[in-house]
Image: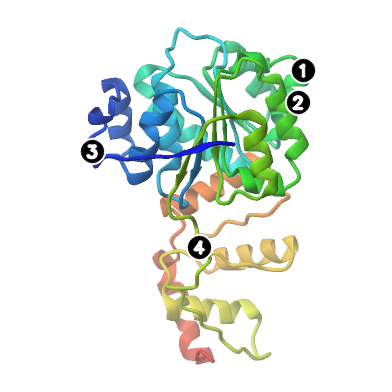
Amino acid sequence: MSSDTAESTPLETFADLGIAADIIEGLTDLGYQKPLEVQIAAIRLILEGRHVSLRSKTGSGKTAAFGIPLIQKLTSTIQKPAVLVLAPTRELAGQIAAELTGIGHHRKIEVVAVYGGASISDQINKIKAGVQIVVGTPGRLLDLVRRRVLKPDTFKAVVLDEADEMLSMGFYEDVTSLMDGCTNCEQVVILSASLDEDTKSLVDRYTSDVVRIDLSADVLSVDGIHNIYYTIGDELPRHHYLLHVMAVEKPSSAIVFVNTRKDASLVATLMAREGLQTEMISGELPQKERERVMAAIRSGELRPGRARDRYQRFVARDQLQPA
């Protein structure tokens, strides 16, 4: 594999990068004001059709970095899927699809997210109605290929997001099977926190003359994390102590981890009885329900502070202190 060093110019606007007005309008709707570092580094290269290997921090704007230029190459008149994005998890696939939909909204680009745990018939109907971008997990994508709903040879560009994570989860054969079918693919973009042997092998197998964009990657760090633990007794049920901790710490939102699904249901019920806005989430919930709960957490709908007066009384009763 050969590689170049990507050069970036301190440009100020998306227009400076050659991005069309309708796409800029979508970016404005999403809250983008100017290009981020990773976007400045990647957009022009992807617009030129180069194969790109990108390494950058989570939350740095990587989805838009590949989404903007790939969407710029598309038009709504294209009725066959032209861009394939592979992601390791359902949640990430949904997030990517939502952002690409926003970027391409004013260009009328259709995006579908496909993954297990959701209705495959709905996904099939959306694909048959005409989409330009398919975002999905390897297993569901292969299922759609086997059903002849998706034809990999229609894809002109393939993106592997969190490639190292996807391969470490055992998807190497699924990914290569999908990519082997993309016989008309002209461009590959790989996003990965590391270039381990499997990821490097994948890059070498499907690309040549790769441009490496290596910005600061995620680093495991405890900086900024404040750890506190409380000791509890046996005088009261455990959820009373939990209510006390919530009253003392006053979190704007909170996630409570428990051992079992049964415990999750019990704690959620008890918290709700005390007036807290509480939702349970576990693997037994349908995918759509899990997505609804996670969306409520991200949007701030689940805010325990609104019910704080209902459980403030536990502070005086228990008088717990951090250990």
Q: How far apart are marks 3 and 2 (CA)?
A: 43 Å
Disc 3 to disc 1: CB gap under 8 Å: no
- For the N terminus, the image quarter is top right
Residue at numbered disc 3: 11
Disc 3 residue type (three-letter) = Leu
The residue furthest front is 2
Q: In which quarter of the image is residue 208?
A: top right
Q: Position of residue 25 (x, y in %)?
A: 28, 27
Q: In which quarter of the image is residue 21?
A: top left
Disc 4 residue type (three-letter) = Val
Image mark for residue 219: 4
Seen at 68% across and 15% down, the residue is: 151
On the picture, is 262 further left or further right than 33?
right
Disc 2 residue type (three-letter) = Asp
Q: Residues within 10 Å of mark 4 (few under 14, many from 20)?
A: few
- For the C terminus, the image quarter is bottom right
Disc 2 to disc 1: CB gap under 8 Å: yes
In the displayed structure, 274 sits above or below 70; it is below
Q: Please name which of the two marks, 3 or 2, marks the residue nearer to the observer.
A: 3
Q: How crowded is mark 1: few (under 14 residues within 10 Å), some or many (20 or more)?
A: few
Sequence-earlier tag: 2 or 4: 2
Sequence-earlier tag: 4 or 3: 3
Q: Specify the color scheme.
A: rainbow
Q: Position of residue 116 (x, y in %)?
A: 70, 35
Q: How far apart are marks 2 and 1 (CA)?
A: 6 Å
Disc 4 to disc 3: CB gap under 8 Å: no
Q: Please name which of the two marks, 3 or 1, marks the residue nearer to the observer.
A: 3
Q: Distance between the residues labelled 4 and 3?
A: 27 Å
Image mark for residue 147: 1
Residue at numbered disc 2: 143
Sequence-earlier tag: 4 or 1: 1
